[in-house]
Image (spheres, coloured by chain):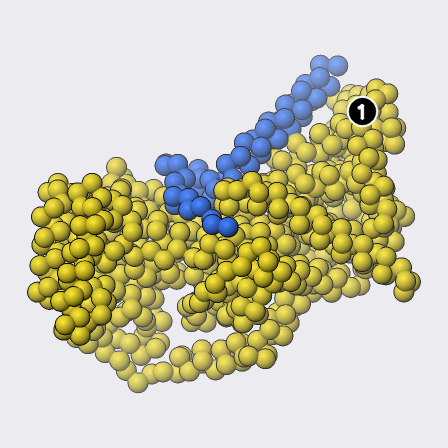
Chain colours: A blue, B yellow
Amino acid sequence: MIINSLIVAAVFGYAGYTLYRYIQRTKQGGHCAHCSLKDKCTTKCETVKKESISH
Amino acid sequence: MSQTALIGNPNTGKTSLFNSLTGSYEHVGNWSGVTIEKKIGKLKTEDGFLIDLPGVYSLHPLSKDEAVVIRYMLHEHPQTLLNIVDASLLERNLQLTVQLLEYGKPLILCLNMVDVAERRGLKIDDRLLSKRLGVPVIPVIARKGEGCQEISVLLNQTIQTKPIAIFYGDMVERAIDSIVRLLPENLPFSARWLALHLLEQNPYAMEFAQEWISEEELKQQIEAVSQELKKHGDSTVSRSIFNTRKNWISQIVNECVVMEEKASAVNWTKRIDDVLTHKILGVPIFLAFMYLLFMMTFNWIGTPLSDMLDRFFNGPLTKWMEQLLVSIHAGPFVRALVLNGIVGGVGGVLVFIPQIFVLFFFISFLEDSGYMARAALVMDRLMEKVGLNGKAFIPMVIGFGCNVPGVMAARTIEQPKERLLTILLTPLMSCSARLPVYALFTGAFFDHHQGEIVFSLYVLGISVAFLLAKLFSSTVLKNEASIFVIELPPYRVPQWKTLWLSTWDKGKGFVRKAGTFIFGGSVFIWLLSYMGPGGIGVSMDESFLAKIGGLIAPLLVPLGFGTWQAASSLLTGFLAKEVVVSTMNIIYHAANTSSLKGVITGNFTPLSAYSFIVFILLYVPCVATVAAIRHETGSKKWTFFSIGYGLAIAYLLSFIIYQGGQLFI
């Protein structure tokens, strides 16, 4: 019973965490999230000043 | 902590040098436009940071990514500049070097690709060059890491260099002096450097200096000098400055470079280019390469490896998991969760890893060999006709890996409407996440023609993108065509290490996603299939997943896949396209890919299967791509447009394929 509860808690806990992190990363618009240096990068992903696209 | 800025022309090997000096790995490509933002890495041997900046030909920016460099130099003040130049194109590269030398900070000149220069018959006297420029000059071969040790040693020392002072003629010099007098004395870089950029009307320099010198005041200065210059035959101040620098550089190059009669390498490149970039043969050759790529991925190498992995997941792994669960007395809920949810969902996606890596390996091979730059050139002729720029080809090829970096890479396109068009169309490029769906369906229905079917999907994605480009550019996004300039790097035999790193860089996201998001998604989808309005442990047809899918299923009947299972898979596919396969594994309770193939052959026909994978190719971009589009366009309107047109075109094409196909079958 305890083992069952532990497995269920671990699986759902981890699943919830991965979904939460994915949504957080998606909110960043993929900038730092898709940079392979993000773990070593010490400054925020400062991108070029956004130029509005004229339509 | 000290900051060293790595600056150079596009495609001079900056990223390779960055990797050697920092020990980290960033994607390296044998074509322009790989670094689109500044990247920061910690130096291996020194307590400081190395900043990798996008490749630029000049500090006067033409596109958004090029502006990163001048903004960085104006606002962040690096202690040292590491200027990497292509030894085989020294004269052109030195235009940027001159602007960096005028900045007034210590500079190390890395003479990269000396091996290529030598093969082209160029002999460079690096000592004399160092003497003439007044800075250390280190010959390097960044790809092999040769010469990097010397740079590391130099970075540990204090380098003293004096800013060069090229004489630009009396009139320009007078204007420089009067601008310098208006600037504060405590600027962190040479005031003369800033004055020159103001005279060249660099918009970022003008914005930086506006508190000391107004735009009006500056225009008056420039106008006065221009009038004087015109009297002496020069057209503009910028032109005069450029010409002076050009003459100064030519003099140095004449002194330091000896050209030997050894042009065989150049001839070889030219001969190959004559065929690969041929007006008529260019596109068929490109398509032939793509065809070979998919045959290798699906028919010859990738699928047999995937089948082996599937047998392992199906056999030993599932057996061990079952034994483990029995030995710890796991209940039926936990067993269903682990075996149906996790092994079914995650394992069902993981088996396609070999195919994805094989595909990326060959794409990396084409990139690193120098062919992709030629492909961009070949495609430019076609792209120009549909209102796109050849530069759009680069984001689109990156989009074959993942649409998110593809959308971001569109920043290298200067013209705003061409950039927007590229952002909107890049999601039509078939990303790696869609491959598991193709592999599953082609394996089930078109076993002996997998490569051809997947090839047709990629060609369909590109063709639809071109047709829509033509439609959008002549209606909602009318624009002026811009010129496409791309540097054709010399051909080279890719190195195994670079190939592996590049393949891993492209494919690692897929592996990581399987262990994280696909895991979470699979558990969530399994839960939706296990629970229903009637309670827990309900039959699949009574589950929440069936109820939700059932609402949309009627709309999909004309497309040939109007079942709640297909509808639910498509809905979850919006989160990430691989999840379509996970969902199907869970819904159909498939123990492995082979049994899933068996189940879906009972639920689809070959025609409805093809209609389904075409729909997967074209319908909405995944949530991460939608977020990237929102970020890059800065517009909700265009974000919704990208979702809306995708759905519309997917529905239309699947409808035509299914309904049209039925007439013949």
Q: Residue at x 64, y 28 (%)?
A: A15
User: Is disc 1 placed on a helix, strand or loop?
Assistant: strand
Between B511 and B569, the one lying in front of the other is B569
Q: Is residue B451 left or right of residue B403?
A: right
Q: Residue at x 78, y 38 (%)?
A: B568
> Residue B529, can we see it?
no
Above or below, B552 against B442 in this view is above
Which residue, as the protein is rendered here, is positioned at the far bottom?
B261
Q: Is residue B118 left or right of residue B417?
A: left
Occupied quadrant, residue B99? bottom left
From the top left corner, tell me how far across and down residue B128 is, in percent. Answer: 15, 69
Q: Quadrant of the N terminus of chain B?
A: top left
From the top left corner, tell me how far across and down residue B571 is, in percent. Answer: 73, 39
Occupied quadrant, residue B241? bottom left
Between B119 and B485, the one lying in front of the other is B485
Subunit ID for the residue under disc 1:
B
Q: Quadrant of the C terminus of chain B?
A: bottom right
Query: Few, some or many C-alpha atoms within 10 Å of disc 1 (few <14, some 14-19, many ≥20)?
Result: some
Between B92 and B87, the one lying in front of the other is B92
Q: Residue at x 50, y 81 (%)?
A: B274
Query: Pointer 1: what residue?
Result: B531
Q: Residue at x 62, y 31 (%)?
A: A19
* Callout 1 amino acid: Met
From the top left corner, tell me how far across and down residue B494 is, in percent. Answer: 48, 65
Above or below, B663 against B420 in this view is below
From the top left corner, tell me how far across and down residue A18 is, in percent. Answer: 60, 31
> Residue B281, can we see it?
yes
Q: Is residue A47 left or right of residue B454?
A: left
